């Protein structure tokens, strides 16, 4: 196992806490930028591992977030050590901030950054700041959604925003051909959920009886996930309204927010942050 070269710290997470995690063969690490289908991929992995639409516990008890500062580090490590089933952990830290272990499968999901940004500013407005842990204080949110989007888009790389998202995806893009790395796109999941789930199962070496597939696929749809909010919404105490967590789950939301000057401004910004190939992939052929 190789130690990570980078450390990621925010007001609510610290990737150094992965030092307390004793990785095992077969572990799964879901490493995604924020608002790129993290909970969706956690749910898919849970359904494949337990092979039942009804999960045996709340999702964030089954799929632990080691970085999260609201949970005591020793308690987190003990909870992971006590898990007897195949483990699938989540993180918003990029791959270069995680232990590099050939025994582990790393899953990263990308999304059109414009949709991720719109989703993030809605997510941010739903946070109960009084319940949040971490270092420092939270700046007041701009009043208008468009202004909040541009704060996200212009944030420096060490803060949650477009730069950190593109860096995160670049760390997966660079190693996407490794047999223990799976890079997926949110649009791919929307367009072909059954095919995506079968691909994930294949990469994880999980055999699913044919008769079980319809129930598992249905359980991974947004309409069905919304009926299980109490079990699936992560970190339940930090939300003002848990029902707003699965807000849309669609693509193209940004079109209602960004006008043509905004779109040109976005094009100029994103082109400074990644290679043309990654930019083309993350936008899935949508015109910039």
Image: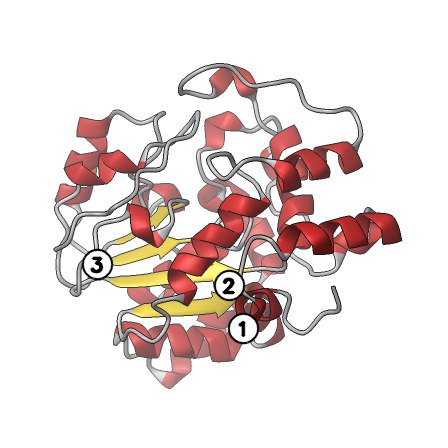
Quadrant housing residue 197: bottom left
- Residue 42, compared with residue 10, is above or below; it is below
3 vs 2, front mark: 3
Left/right placement of residue 284 relative to residue 259 reads left
Numbered mark located on residue 27 in the image = 3
Q: What's the residue at 80%, 30% (across, down)?
A: 144
Q: By what rule are the colours in the image chosen?
A: secondary structure
Does the rendering let one see residue 56?
A: no
- Say whether marks 1 and 2 touch (CB < 8 Å): yes
Mark number, residue 271: none
Question: Where is mark 1, residue-wise?
Answer: 193
Front-most of 278 and 87?
Answer: 278
Marker disc for residue 220: 2
Q: Which residue is pictured at 75% across the width and 69% down the height?
A: 287
Disc 3 secondary structure class? loop
Looking at the image, the residue that sits furthest to the right is 260
Circle 2 packing at 10 Å, graded few (<14), some (14-19), many (20+), is many
Nearest the viewer among 112 and 238 is 112
* Element type where label 2 sits in the image: loop
Residue 208, image x and y in percent? 33, 78
Spatial CA distance of label 1 from label 2 is: 8 Å
Instruction: Point out residue 211 in the picture as x, y percentages from the top left corner.
Output: 40, 82
Compute the Cα span from label 3 to label 2.
Answer: 21 Å
Nearer mark to the viewer, of 1 and 3: 3
Find numbered disc 1 in the image and state the secondary structure of the residue it sits on.
helix
Where does the image place residue 193, in percent across and percent down from the top left?
54, 73
Q: Is residue 42 left or right of residue 205?
A: right
Which is more N-terminal, label 2 or label 1?
A: 1
* Marks 3 and 2 close (CB-CB < 8 Å): no
Quadrant of the image containing the C terminus:
bottom right
Residue name at image x 40 percent, y 18 percent: 135
């Amino acid at each position: 196992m190789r130690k990570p070269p980078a450390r990621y710290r925010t007001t609510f997470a610290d990737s150094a806490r992965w030092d307390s995690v004793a990785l095992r063969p077969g572990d799964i690490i879901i490493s995604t930028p924020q608002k790129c289908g993290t909970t969706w991929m956690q749910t898919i992995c849970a359904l494949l591992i337990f092979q039942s639409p009804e999960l045996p516990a709340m999702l964030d008890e089954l799929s632990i977030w080691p970085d999260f500062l609201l949970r005591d580090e020793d308690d987190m490590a003990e909870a992971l050590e006590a898990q007897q089933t195949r483990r699938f952990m989540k993180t918003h830290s990029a791959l270069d901030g995680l232990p590099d272990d050939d025994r582990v499968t790393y899953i990263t999901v990308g999304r059109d950054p414009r949709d991720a940004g719109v989703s993030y500013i809605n997510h941010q407005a739903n946070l109960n700041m009084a319940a949040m842990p971490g270092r420092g204080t939270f700046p007041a949110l701009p009043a208008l959604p468009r202004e909040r989007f541009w704060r996200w888009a212009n944030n420096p790389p060490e803060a949650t925003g477009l730069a950190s998202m593109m860096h995160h995806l670049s760390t997966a893009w660079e190693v996407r051909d490794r047999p223990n790395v799976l890079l997926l796109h949110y649009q791919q999941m929307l367009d072909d959920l059954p095919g995506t789930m079968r691909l994930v199962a294949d990469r994880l070496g999980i055999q699913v009886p044919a008769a079980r597939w319809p129930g598992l696929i249905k359980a991974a749809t947004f309409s069905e996930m919304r009926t299980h909010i109490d079990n699936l919404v992560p970190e339940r105490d930090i939300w003002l309204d848990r029902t707003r967590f699965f807000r849309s789950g669609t693509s193209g939301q940004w079109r209602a927010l960004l006008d043509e000057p905004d779109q040109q401004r976005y094009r100029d910004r994103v082109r400074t942050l990644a290679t043309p190939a990654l930019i083309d992939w993350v936008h899935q052929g949508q015109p910039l």
